[in-house]
């Protein structure tokens, strides 16, 4: 009887193994556990960095790539709503700045619209983005997108300047449900900014870390510098403009300030 049970168990066990192998259960379980534990720690393959996004912009935003704010732009501000919401010519007391920010834009789509900025012959670009990509995208993917933008700017014979991604505050979750877990998002921002800083230092690229001015040591955007936990007040933009002007002053002598009076 015992021999019969032993043989039956072996046969049943063999059948279960064959079924598991046929439907690849071991591989599926392994992939699920392994990917969840390491997706933020292991280098990504190039194939994982390509996203099939349909970046369709409203005509009023798409059209602005062709508006001649100036025939000879020296500066391009490239990013999302944090760039879009500012009058950079007024902030920087110039008349040679192109504002190329789109509200709600993400880094993969920003990379796709670089083609509209080819041959602008600007001397310096200030690059900002990433907050709209979190928490849904891996920080290494965002880091690669930043590098893609920087390489484009270099190929345009322009100077790239990276703006570190700004932290958000608990207030962000009130208006933006996807940002209710602000602490997790700020942790991702901290990680991404570390990648960007190391990359900038190793490749002699200028960068601006406005978080030192408008965020707390706990990685939280200070309430006096934000309108909704994400977007900035005028005081924050004034501090940002000071940082930008300092970079311009120390980067190139060809960009002399123009006589634009601020009201």
Image (cartoon, rainbow, N blue to C red):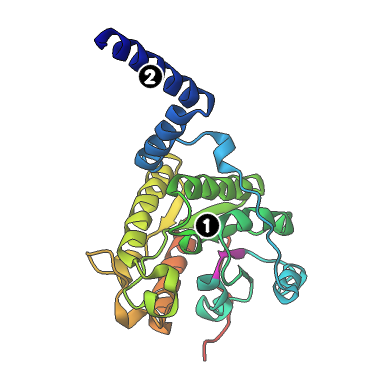
Name which residue lies at 38% across and 53% down: 193
Left or right of 253 in this view: 183: left
Q: Which residue is mark 1?
A: 252
**Mark whose residue sits in front, 2 or 1:** 2
Instruction: Residue 131: give x, y in percent of width and height.
Output: 46, 63
Range covered by the magenta-colored residues: 75-80
Give the answer, above or below, for where 174 lies relative to 51.
below
Q: Which residue is mark 2?
A: 13
Instruction: Residue 80: give x, y in percent of width and height.
Output: 55, 67
Name which residue lies at 53% across and 24% down: 22
Per the image, label 1 sits on a secondary structure element best described as loop
User: Which quadrant of the rendered structure holds the N terminus?
Assistant: top left
Confirm or deny contact between disc 2 and disc 1 (CB under 8 A).
no
Name which residue lies at 61% across and 64% down: 76
Residue furthest left as drawn? 217
Instruction: Residue 217: give x, y in percent of width and height.
Output: 22, 64
Give the answer, above or below, for where 175 lies relative to 46.
below
């Amino acid at each position: 009887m015992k021999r019969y049970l032993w043989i039956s168990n072996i046969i049943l066990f063999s059948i279960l193994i064959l079924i598991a192998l046929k439907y690849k259960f071991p591989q599926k379980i392994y992939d699920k556990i392994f990917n969840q534990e390491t997706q933020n720690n292991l280098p990504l393959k190039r194939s994982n960095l390509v996203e099939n996004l349909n970046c369709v912009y409203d005509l009023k935003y798409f059209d602005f790539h062709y508006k001649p704010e100036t025939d000879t732009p020296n500066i391009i501000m490239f990013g999302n709503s944090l760039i879009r919401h500012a009058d950079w010519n007024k902030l920087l007391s110039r008349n040679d700045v192109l504002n190329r920010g789109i509200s709600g834009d993400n880094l993969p789509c920003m990379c796709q619209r670089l083609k509209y900025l080819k041959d602008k012959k600007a001397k310096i670009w200030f690059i900002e983005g990433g907050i709209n990509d979190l928490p849904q995208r891996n920080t290494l993917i965002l880091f690669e997108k930043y590098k893609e933008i920087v390489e484009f700017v270099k190929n345009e014979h322009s100077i790239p300047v990276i703006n570190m991604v700004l932290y958000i505050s608990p207030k962000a979750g009130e208006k933006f449900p996807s940002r209710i877990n602000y602490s997790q998002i700020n942790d991702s921002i901290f990680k991404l900014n570390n990648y960007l800083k190391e990359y900038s230092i190793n490749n002699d690229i200028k960068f601006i870390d406005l978080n030192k001015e408008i965020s707390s040591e706990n990685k939280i955007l200070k309430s006096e510098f934000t309108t909704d936990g994400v977007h900035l007040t005028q005081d924050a933009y004034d501090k940002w403009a000071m940082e930008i002007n300092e970079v311009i002053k120390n980067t190139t002598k060809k960009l002399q300030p123009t006589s634009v009076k601020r009201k």
